Image: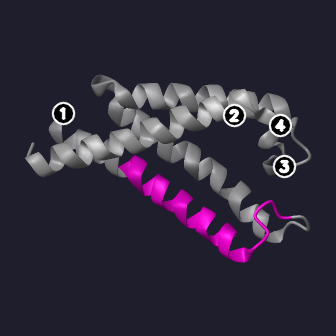
């Protein structure tokens, strides 16, 4: 593996771990702050708490070299799973991210996260 590949792996690992562990801790520490993002037909607080635990686990899996590719894939899958919720914000009568620019940025960041998770899994697949 080249020095550039090592830097890419390190950077992607840091992004995935930081976003997942930080986001998971935030979900557990203040679940009520995330409640407006959960559709009304789901029990908001239990969904948020489970999501927080899942995010922390994904972040930890990404930090361990032997499971890092699975952490990258899990990160991409979770972000892909969240994407419909982000898109839903465009069409709901009471958007959480009211300015369309904010909602658009949110969706674009989610797409970048998906790409980062897939890339992390592929960078490591070349090495193993």
Question: Does 89 sit above or below residue 128?
Answer: below
Q: Nearer the viewer, mark 3 or mark 1?
A: 3
Question: Does 71 sit above or below residue 9?
Answer: above
Q: Label 3 to label 1, Cα distance in Å? A: 42 Å
The mark nearer the N terminus, 3 or 1, is 3
Question: Does 58 sit above or below residue 114?
Answer: above
Q: Label 1 to label 4, Cα distance in Å? A: 42 Å
Residue 70, quarter of picture: top left
Residue tagged 1? 128
The mark nearer the N terminus, 1 or 2, is 2
Residue tagged 3? 36
Residue 78, quarter of picture: top right
Q: Residue at x 70, y 27 (%)?
A: 28
Q: In this view, which residue lies farthest toward the bottom?
A: 100
Residue closest to the eye, 119 or 3: 3
Residue tagged 2? 27
Q: Residue at x 52, y 37 (%)?
A: 20
Q: Label 4 to label 2, Cα distance in Å? A: 8 Å
Q: Label 1 to label 2, Cα distance in Å? A: 34 Å
Q: Which residues are magenta?
A: 95-118
Circles 4 and 2, Cβ within 8 Å, touching? The answer is no
Q: Nearer the viewer, mark 1 or mark 4?
A: 4
What secondary structure is marked by label 4? helix
In-image side of 91 versus 75 (left or right)? right
What main secondary structure does the magenta stretch of the protein show?
Answer: helix
Q: Residue at x 24, y 49 (%)?
A: 8
What secondary structure is marked by label 2? helix
Residue tagged 4? 32
Q: Bin the neighbour count of mark 1 within 10 Å (Cα to Cα): few under 14, some 14-19, many 20 and up.
A: few
What secondary structure is marked by label 1? loop
Q: Residue at x 48, y 53 (%)?
A: 113
């Amino acid at each position: 593996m080249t020095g550039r590949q090592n830097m890419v792996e390190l950077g992607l690992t840091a992004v995935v771990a930081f976003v997942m562990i930080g986001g998971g801790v935030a979900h557990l520490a203040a679940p009520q702050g995330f409640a407006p993002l959960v559709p009304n037909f789901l029990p908001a607080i239990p969904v948020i708490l489970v999501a927080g635990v899942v995010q922390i686990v994904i972040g930890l899996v990404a930090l361990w070299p032997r499971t890092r590719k699975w952490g990258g894939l899990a990160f991409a899958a979770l972000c892909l799973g969240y994407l419909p919720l982000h898109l839903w914000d465009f069409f709901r009568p009471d958007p959480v991210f009211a300015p369309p620019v904010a909602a658009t940025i949110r969706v674009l960041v989610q797409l970048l996260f998906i790409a980062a998770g897939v890339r992390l899994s592929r960078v490591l697949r070349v090495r193993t």
